[in-house]
Image (tube, helix red, strand yellow):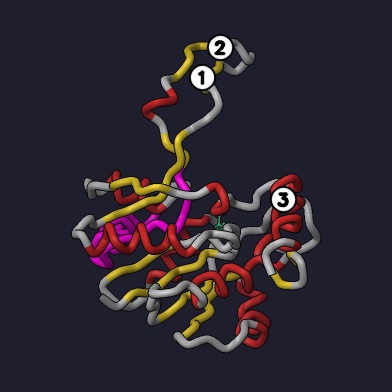
Amino acid sequence: MSTSVIIPAAGSGVRLGEDRPKAFVDVGGATVLARTVGSITGAPGLDVDRIVVVVPGELVERTRAELPEADCEIVVVAGGAERSDSVRAGLAHSTGEFVLVHDAARPFTPSAVFARVVAALRAGHPAVVPGLPVVDTLKKTDSDGGVVVTVDRAELRAIQTPQGFHADALVRAYAGDGDVATDDAGLAERAGIPVVVVDGDPDAFKITTPWDLRLARAMAKGWD
Ligand code: C5P
């Protein structure tokens, strides 16, 4: 099955507090984005036909010039204000029967996670997400910090990317123009598309805070 991967990389990274968008921050001699693209082009057996990288408008030309050559076609387009806007922009340039959406901010995602997502797509599931069991106890609180209830964590999963879709399912998920969600499967769920969870991996963590960036830089030392 032909597959494309959309990489949303157009976030500002305000929570990271660096002087540039998160995807363009250096982690051990390569940008977060270059590492993420490399994790896809280097994944054994993944066989991607096209990667659509979605970056802030002012960085489109620079990204085209700086991303290394790869075996598959790489298209760079401008993103939007919300993550969903960026994915929607990428979707307009994606091709093939399967489309994966993978955060640029998860540069150490193991190839086995991609393989599990694609295997479930091949098995016929229209929407597949990797997830991890939640290890901490979770409590719902009110605006004053008072505990309302302790949530049963056994039923919960922390969801990562790559999130995989049969292309028609992702198009349906994104058909509502103004829809916003923190992940792509959330839009699929709203469109009535069944979503299944496969095993994620702690290494697929998302760089969000300065602590995450320290972890990523420490991992890079043992990575290359
Ligand atoms: O903000 P958050 O960490 O959830 O972003 C996840 C991914 O979505 C990041 O790779 C980020 O660059 C991307 N994003 C985007 N366009 C936005 C916001 C986030 O491509 N407007």
Residue 61 sits in quarter = bottom right
Whether the magenta-drawn stretch holds residue 166 is answered as yes
What is the three-letter code of the residue carrying label 3? Leu
Q: Is residue 126 visible?
A: yes
Which label lies toward us, 3 or 1?
A: 3
Q: Residue at x 50, y 67 (%)?
A: 7
Q: Which mark is residue 123?
A: none
Residue identifier under label 3: 215
- In the depicted view, which residue is nearer to us: 134 or 94? 134
**Which residues make up the magenta segment?**
159-180
Q: Secondary structure at mark 3?
A: helix
Give the distance between the C-alpha atoms of the residues marked 3 and 1, in whole angstroms: 28 Å
Q: Residue at x 29, y 45 (%)?
A: 189
Q: Which mark is residue 147?
A: 2
Q: Please say if 41 is above or below 164.
A: below
Residue identifier under label 1: 140
Q: Residue at x 41, y 50 (%)?
A: 130
**First in sequence: mark 3 or mark 2?**
2
Q: How many marks?
A: 3
Q: Secondary structure at mark 1?
A: strand
Q: x%, y% of residue 83?
A: 51, 56
